[in-house]
Image (spheres, helix red, strand yellow):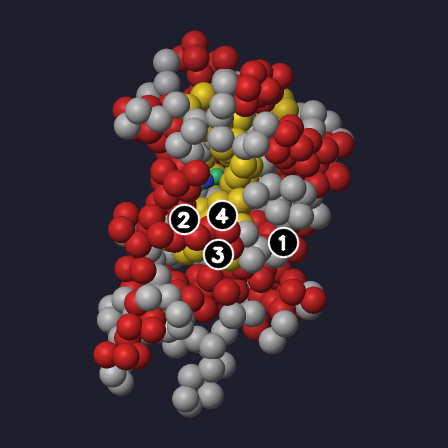
Amino acid sequence: MTGRSQGLSTRCVHAGEIDDAHGSPHTPIYTSTTFRFASTADIVEVVQGRKSAALYTRYGLNPTIRSLEEKLAQLEGAEAALAFCSGMAAESALFLTHGRKGIVCLGDAYGGTLELVAAQLPELGMRTALLLGSESDRLEAELRKGAGLVFFETPTNPGLEIFDIRAIADLAHRHGALVAVDNTFASPANQQPLALGADLVVHSATKYLGGHNDLLCGVVLGSAEQVAPIRAAVGVLGGVPDAHSAYLLLRGLKTLALRMERHNANGMRVARFLEAHPRIRRVWYPGLASHPDHAIAARTLAGFGGVVTFEVDTDLEGCMRFIDACRIPYIAPSLGGVESLIEMPVLMSFWDVEPKARQAMGITDSLVRLSCGVEDADDLIADFEQALRKV
Ligand SMILES: Cc1ncc(COP(=O)(O)O)c(C=O)c1O
């Protein structure tokens, strides 16, 4: 099947699925860690790379994992995809492979990424720089120093800042650097960074790609040339997914396009409702004209996603009362699943950041991050209406 020319929903359902001997409509779960050969001559062909076949699961040479990678590649419009057991495993392998000349991490990034880039990798002797979005003008200076990889999320977390992928890619390429985009918050349904000039894409597939809060996976995508060294590294670093998670992700992906339509619609409805509510101080949602990066978002995103960040007009305790009064969203970290999830960044991802530094990052005591699931928007809005009365 030549999925690339088909629509996204068709690719979600059919791309990459492999036939088994019994006509199963989905790729079976191959739990085997190793695969047998008819002769030594046969296995030598595979080991020496002249023929591709299932061989050993840690190398990703397992039919369920390969099927997943083919589907992911077709959804993101990439030549090659490499699946991992978590988003962080994907990022680690990417940085260890393509970050050796130096990494610039731009904008707010997920806490685990910041820990990796700011602390763990420098301890291994790697040169890294963290620049806030407002410090983007320093990117060129970092590139002049020889950084070989620019990495950023867009939209970012939790401020939903939007970067101009094409402009950053043009600048990085002029200096011979690669650009990797964490596309977790957008998903390939809303944003295609490779088509906008990025060299590599990373996802925490735990979020929208899986979509059901029931699996942990990651993926790196890009050209065959850029993905090959990462594949060689992961064979020994060992961060591959197991076949059960790969299967769950394959299944979740079948409804990605459908789910994203609802996440986008719910995000927009809820953001508009909150923006008009007298107990809400401010809403960050790239689909709102009030968002500082709305103009870029309107150009780069096909939909604005399900994550809405907002500040309640109250103090820490009042905000906790609001969260506790919500009946539909679960109080939980993470995002991108069918269930709405709600959290206060100040109490979760940023609890150990010193208050002054937290304020400087815009993480106030009444900031809320909501991941709209696929419930009915009217029910979500009615729930927030009653919960805001408890502030
Ligand atoms: C934007 C982003 N990237 C990467 C990660 C790490 O992914 P995982 O939890 O699958 O390791 C997360 C996790 O929350 C994330 O939000």
Question: Which residue occupies the foreground of this view, 49 or 240?
Answer: 49
Asked whether the residues under the numbered discs 4 and 2 touch, taking CB atoms below 8 Å apart as contact, a structural biologist would say: yes
**Residue at 37% across / 43% down in the picture?**
93
Q: Kindly identify the residue that appears in the image at 63 percent across and 72 percent down.
A: 2
Mark 3 vs mark 2: in front: 2
Distance, label 4 to label 1, CA atoms, is 23 Å
Q: Is residue 388 visible?
A: no
* Residue 81 badge: 3
The residue that mark 2 highlights is 229
Q: What amino acid is at disc 4? A: Gln
**Horizontal and vertical percent position of residue 70:** 50, 65
Outermost residue toward the top in this view = 356
Disc 4 residue: CB within 8 Å of ligand 1? no
Point out the tag, 3 or 1, that comes first from the N-terminus: 3
Look at label 3 and name its amino acid: Ala
User: In the structure shown, which secondary structural element does the residue marked by tag 3 occupy?
Assistant: strand
Relative to 257, is 302 above or below?
above
Report crowding for label 4: few under 14, some 14 to 19, many 20 or more residues within 10 A (C-alpha): some
Q: Please tell me whether mark 4 sits on a helix, a strand or a loop.
A: helix
- According to the image, label 4 marks what residue? 226
Is residue 129 or residue 126 the one in the foreground?
126
The disc, 4 or 3, on the residue closer to the chain's N-terminal end is 3
What x and y, as percent, mark residue 244?
Answer: 33, 66
- 173 vs 243: above or below: above
* Amino acid found under the numbered disc labelled 1: Ala
First of labels 3, 2 by sequence position: 3
Does the residue tagged 2 have its C-beta within 8 Å of any atom of ligand 1? no
**Does residue 276 appear left or right of residue 345 in this picture?**
right
Question: Which mark's residue is nearer the viewer, 4 or 1?
Answer: 4
Whether the residues at callouts 3 and 2 have beta carbons within 8 Å, the answer is no
Picture disc at residue 311: none
The quadrant holding residue 67 is bottom left
